């Protein structure tokens, strides 16, 4: 209790940031304040400011893609790279040797290589993809941030363990405000390959969605799911119709497709009943949704983002080591993301 009182100024400042945890911040998690509308007020202001920022960064983005992103919650671009460049990217993701971090969730292994400056310099085709001006415009617009996302080579291995309860397979929203994630798929993703699954249009802050957010915010004391307590609300598929949303739909894509998503919308990792692997270039961008400025596209900020991620990972490693555990995102011994089961 005393510790919370001492930290109260910091908890208050967090109200004006992307902080979302109902569990770790007693102001954000206050049932009394949320009954008075604290959570929904943050949601409304965050969405208004982020939409303003997206508009500022929309110049040069094709109208059709903007409309898809605003209306559906994601945009999809096929045949992003030439056949030669795609093959080069494909080959580089298999040739690169670097630190691999892994997260185990249920029966799924997610493994990543951070595309920091060193790794990008040894992967010229990947570097060209990330430096393409039209792609950068799309990513910045979708993120509402004049600043490129942190990117990784990512491999998702489904059904590699005898376990259940992969939290990524539960329909959820990442946080209370618009955020961006992207996937550049390096192989065809069809049925039974744990495809990305999205509720089209659930990125919109409708009146029904706002009422749902309000009800969730005042019932956190009864919530049992840790991710939801941390601000990533879960939703049952049966609730979607009442909110005016369609059922979730799998996003099947051919290789060489870029998918950019607003993860305020409800989404999940798709189902599969077989052991399989999919690979992609993946990135994420989150920003303070209460800051109306889009920021400056300076190289120093990209370097700081990459440096900050490395420091965060080291801190999590040390914390877990003290507790005799491994961090959620821990280093694995292998320097090869792929195994013999990965096909083209």
Image (spheres, grey):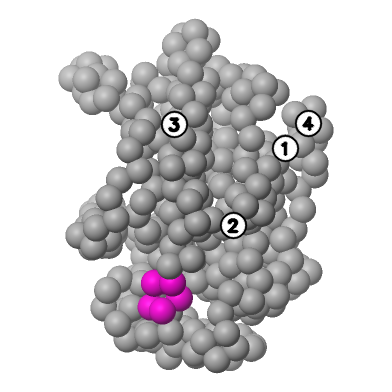
Residue 257 x, y percent position in the rendering: 63, 71
Q: Which residue is mark 4?
A: 244
Q: Which residue is mark 3?
A: 49
Query: Helix, strand, or loop for circle 3?
Result: helix
Residue 211 place in picture, x, y as percent: 65, 19
Circle nearer the N terminus (4, 1): 1
- Asked if marks 1 and 3 touch (Cβ < 8 Å), the reply is no
In this rendering, the answer to whether 37 lies above or below 135 is: above
Mark 1 and mark 2 lie on one chain; the one further toward the N terminus is 2
Nearer the camera: disc 3 or disc 4: 3
Alpha carbon separation for disc pair 1 and 2: 34 Å
- Residue density around tag 3, few if under 14, some if 14–19, many if 20 or more, within 10 Å: many
Q: State which mark lies toward you, 4 or 1.
A: 4
Q: Check disc 2 and report its element: helix, strand or loop.
A: loop
* CA distance separating discs 3 and 2: 22 Å
Which residues fall within the magenta stretch? 127-132
- State whether residue 324 is above or below residue 124: above
Residue at image mark 2? 62
Q: Quadrant of residue 29 in the image?
A: top left
């Amino acid at each position: 209790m005393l510790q919370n009182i001492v930290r109260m100024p910091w908890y208050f400042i967090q109200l004006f940031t992307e902080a979302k945890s109902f569990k770790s911040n007693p102001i954000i998690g206050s049932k009394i304040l949320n009954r008075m509308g604290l959570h929904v007020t943050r949601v409304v202001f965050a969405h208004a400011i982020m939409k303003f920022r997206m508009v500022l960064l929309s110049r040069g983005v094709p109208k059709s893609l903007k409309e898809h992103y605003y209306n559906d919650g994601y945009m999809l671009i096929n045949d992003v790279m030439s056949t030669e460049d795609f093959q080069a990217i494909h080959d580089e993701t298999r040739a690169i040797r670097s630190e691999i971090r892994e997260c185990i969730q249920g029966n799924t292994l997610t493994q990543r290589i951070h595309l920091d400056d060193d790794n990008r310099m040894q992967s010229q085709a990947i570097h060209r993809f990330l430096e393409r001006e039209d792609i950068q415009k799309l990513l910045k617009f979708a993120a509402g941030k004049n600043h490129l996302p942190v990117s990784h080579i990512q491999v998702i291995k489904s059904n590699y363990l005898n376990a259940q309860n992969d939290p990524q397979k539960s329909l959820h929203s990442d946080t209370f405000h618009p955020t961006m994630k992207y996937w550049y798929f390096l192989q065809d993703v069809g049925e039974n390959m744990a495809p990305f699954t999205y509720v089209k249009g659930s990125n919109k802050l409708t009146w029904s969605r706002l009422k749902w957010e309000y009800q969730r915010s005042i019932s956190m004391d009864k919530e049992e799911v840790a991710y939801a307590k941390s601000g990533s609300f879960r939703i049952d598929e049966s609730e979607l119709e009442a909110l005016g949303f369609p059922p979730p739909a799998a996003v099947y894509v051919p290789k060489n497709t870029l998918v950019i998503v607003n993860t305020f919308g409800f989404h999940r990792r798709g189902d599969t009943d077989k052991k399989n692997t999919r690979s992609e270039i993946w990135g994420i961008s989150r920003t303070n949704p209460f800051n109306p400025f889009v920021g400056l596209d300076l190289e120093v900020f990209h370097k700081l983002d990459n440096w900050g991620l490395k420091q965060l990972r080291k801190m999590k490693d040390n914390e877990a080591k003290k507790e005799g555990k491994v961090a959620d995102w821990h280093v694995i011994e292998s320097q090869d993301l792929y195994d013999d089961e990965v096909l083209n």
